[in-house]
Amino acid sequence: MNTKLPATTRAQYMQAYNRYDAQANVKYRRAVDEFARKIAEDESPDVLPLYTATFLYYAAGSCMRGASDLVAATYAFKYFDRYTAWFPIRIEVCSTPEGTCLRTISQTQE
Protein backbone atom coordinates (compact mmCIF):
# COMPACT_ATOMS: atom_id res chain seq x y z
CA MET A 1 0.00 0.00 0.00
CA ASN A 2 1.17 3.52 -0.70
CA THR A 3 2.79 4.66 2.54
CA LYS A 4 2.81 8.28 1.34
CA LEU A 5 -0.95 8.48 1.81
CA PRO A 6 -2.21 9.94 5.08
CA ALA A 7 -2.82 7.30 7.76
CA THR A 8 -6.57 7.98 7.78
CA THR A 9 -6.79 7.44 4.02
CA ARG A 10 -4.81 4.20 4.28
CA ALA A 11 -7.11 3.04 7.08
CA GLN A 12 -10.18 3.78 4.94
CA TYR A 13 -8.67 1.87 2.01
CA MET A 14 -7.86 -1.08 4.25
CA GLN A 15 -11.35 -1.13 5.72
CA ALA A 16 -12.91 -1.17 2.24
CA TYR A 17 -10.39 -3.73 1.02
CA ASN A 18 -11.04 -6.03 3.99
CA ARG A 19 -14.80 -5.89 3.43
CA TYR A 20 -14.54 -6.81 -0.26
CA ASP A 21 -11.78 -9.32 0.39
CA ALA A 22 -13.93 -11.15 2.94
CA GLN A 23 -16.74 -11.43 0.39
CA ALA A 24 -14.34 -12.62 -2.31
CA ASN A 25 -12.80 -15.14 0.08
CA VAL A 26 -16.18 -16.72 0.83
CA LYS A 27 -16.98 -17.03 -2.89
CA TYR A 28 -13.50 -18.32 -3.71
CA ARG A 29 -13.58 -20.97 -0.96
CA ARG A 30 -17.05 -22.05 -2.08
CA ALA A 31 -15.76 -22.48 -5.65
CA VAL A 32 -12.76 -24.53 -4.45
CA ASP A 33 -15.07 -26.74 -2.36
CA GLU A 34 -17.40 -27.21 -5.34
CA PHE A 35 -14.43 -28.15 -7.54
CA ALA A 36 -13.20 -30.66 -4.94
CA ARG A 37 -16.71 -32.14 -4.63
CA LYS A 38 -16.91 -32.65 -8.39
CA ILE A 39 -13.49 -34.32 -8.44
CA ALA A 40 -14.57 -36.60 -5.57
CA GLU A 41 -17.68 -37.55 -7.57
CA ASP A 42 -15.44 -38.45 -10.51
CA GLU A 43 -16.62 -35.56 -12.66
CA SER A 44 -14.25 -33.55 -14.83
CA PRO A 45 -14.81 -29.89 -13.96
CA ASP A 46 -13.05 -27.15 -15.88
CA VAL A 47 -10.21 -25.97 -13.66
CA LEU A 48 -9.14 -22.96 -15.76
CA PRO A 49 -11.75 -20.49 -14.40
CA LEU A 50 -10.75 -21.44 -10.87
CA TYR A 51 -7.08 -21.17 -11.79
CA THR A 52 -7.67 -17.63 -13.08
CA ALA A 53 -9.70 -16.67 -10.00
CA THR A 54 -6.90 -17.98 -7.78
CA PHE A 55 -4.33 -15.94 -9.63
CA LEU A 56 -6.37 -12.74 -9.41
CA TYR A 57 -7.39 -13.26 -5.78
CA TYR A 58 -3.89 -13.89 -4.48
CA ALA A 59 -2.18 -11.33 -6.73
CA ALA A 60 -4.52 -8.65 -5.39
CA GLY A 61 -4.07 -9.93 -1.86
CA SER A 62 -0.31 -9.79 -2.09
CA CYS A 63 -0.52 -6.08 -2.85
CA MET A 64 -2.32 -5.50 0.43
CA ARG A 65 -1.27 -8.34 2.73
CA GLY A 66 2.17 -9.18 1.42
CA ALA A 67 4.19 -12.23 0.52
CA SER A 68 2.08 -14.77 2.41
CA ASP A 69 -0.52 -14.54 -0.36
CA LEU A 70 2.14 -15.33 -2.95
CA VAL A 71 3.08 -18.47 -1.07
CA ALA A 72 -0.60 -19.46 -0.78
CA ALA A 73 -1.00 -18.96 -4.54
CA THR A 74 1.89 -21.29 -5.33
CA TYR A 75 0.35 -24.03 -3.16
CA ALA A 76 -3.05 -23.54 -4.79
CA PHE A 77 -1.50 -23.78 -8.25
CA LYS A 78 0.32 -26.99 -7.33
CA TYR A 79 -3.06 -28.45 -6.33
CA PHE A 80 -4.78 -27.34 -9.54
CA ASP A 81 -1.86 -28.50 -11.71
CA ARG A 82 -2.97 -32.07 -11.02
CA TYR A 83 -6.16 -31.41 -12.99
CA THR A 84 -4.88 -29.64 -16.08
CA ALA A 85 -2.04 -30.21 -18.48
CA TRP A 86 -1.63 -26.57 -19.36
CA PHE A 87 -2.34 -23.13 -17.95
CA PRO A 88 -1.45 -19.98 -19.93
CA ILE A 89 0.04 -18.08 -16.98
CA ARG A 90 2.90 -19.18 -14.77
CA ILE A 91 3.74 -17.32 -11.59
CA GLU A 92 7.12 -16.81 -10.07
CA VAL A 93 7.76 -15.36 -6.63
CA CYS A 94 10.78 -13.06 -6.68
CA SER A 95 12.57 -10.82 -4.23
CA THR A 96 13.19 -7.14 -4.80
CA PRO A 97 14.80 -4.44 -2.66
CA GLU A 98 11.26 -3.29 -1.82
CA GLY A 99 10.08 -6.76 -0.79
CA THR A 100 8.56 -9.78 -2.47
CA CYS A 101 6.82 -9.61 -5.82
CA LEU A 102 4.74 -11.77 -8.09
CA ARG A 103 5.98 -12.08 -11.65
CA THR A 104 3.68 -13.50 -14.28
CA ILE A 105 5.00 -15.25 -17.32
CA SER A 106 2.78 -15.99 -20.29
CA GLN A 107 3.26 -19.49 -21.62
CA THR A 108 2.49 -20.91 -25.02
CA GLN A 109 0.91 -24.31 -25.38
CA GLU A 110 3.31 -26.90 -26.73
Image: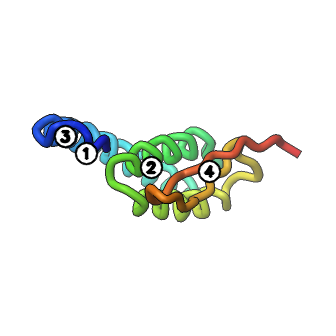
Could you say where residue 18 lies in the image, as x and y percent from the top left?
Answer: 22, 44
Please identify, in this view, whether the residue under mark 1 or under mark 2 is nearer the observer.
Answer: 2
CB-based contact (under 8 Å), mark 3 and mark 1: no
* Residue under pointer 4: 43
Which badge, 4 or 1, is on the more N-terminal residue? 1
Which badge, 3 or 1, is on the more N-terminal residue? 3
* Residue under pointer 2: 58
**Amino acid type, residue under disc 2 in the picture:** Tyr
CB-based contact (under 8 Å), mark 1 and mark 2: no
Which label belongs to residue 22? Answer: 1
Work out which residue is located at the far left of the displayed protein and give it: 8
Which badge, 2 or 3, is on the more N-terminal residue? 3
Question: Which residue occupies 57% across, 59% down?
Answer: 93
**Amino acid type, residue under disc 4 in the picture:** Glu
> Is residue 40 among the parts visible in the rendering?
no
Secondary element type, mark 1 = helix
Residue in front for this viewpoint, 93 or 30: 93
Secondary element type, mark 4 = loop
Question: Which residue occupies 53% across, 64% down?
Answer: 75
Describe residue 18's horizontal placement relative to residue 78 as left or right: left
Which badge, 1 or 2, is on the more N-terminal residue? 1
Could you say where residue 44 lies in the image, as x and y percent from the top left?
Answer: 65, 48
Could you say where residue 81 lies in the image, as x and y percent from the top left?
Answer: 66, 58
Please identify, in this view, whether the residue under mark 3 or under mark 1 is nearer the observer.
Answer: 3
Please identify, in this view, whether the residue under mark 3 or under mark 4 is nearer the observer.
Answer: 3
Crowdedness of circle 3 by 10 Å Cα count: few (<14), some, many (20+)? Answer: some
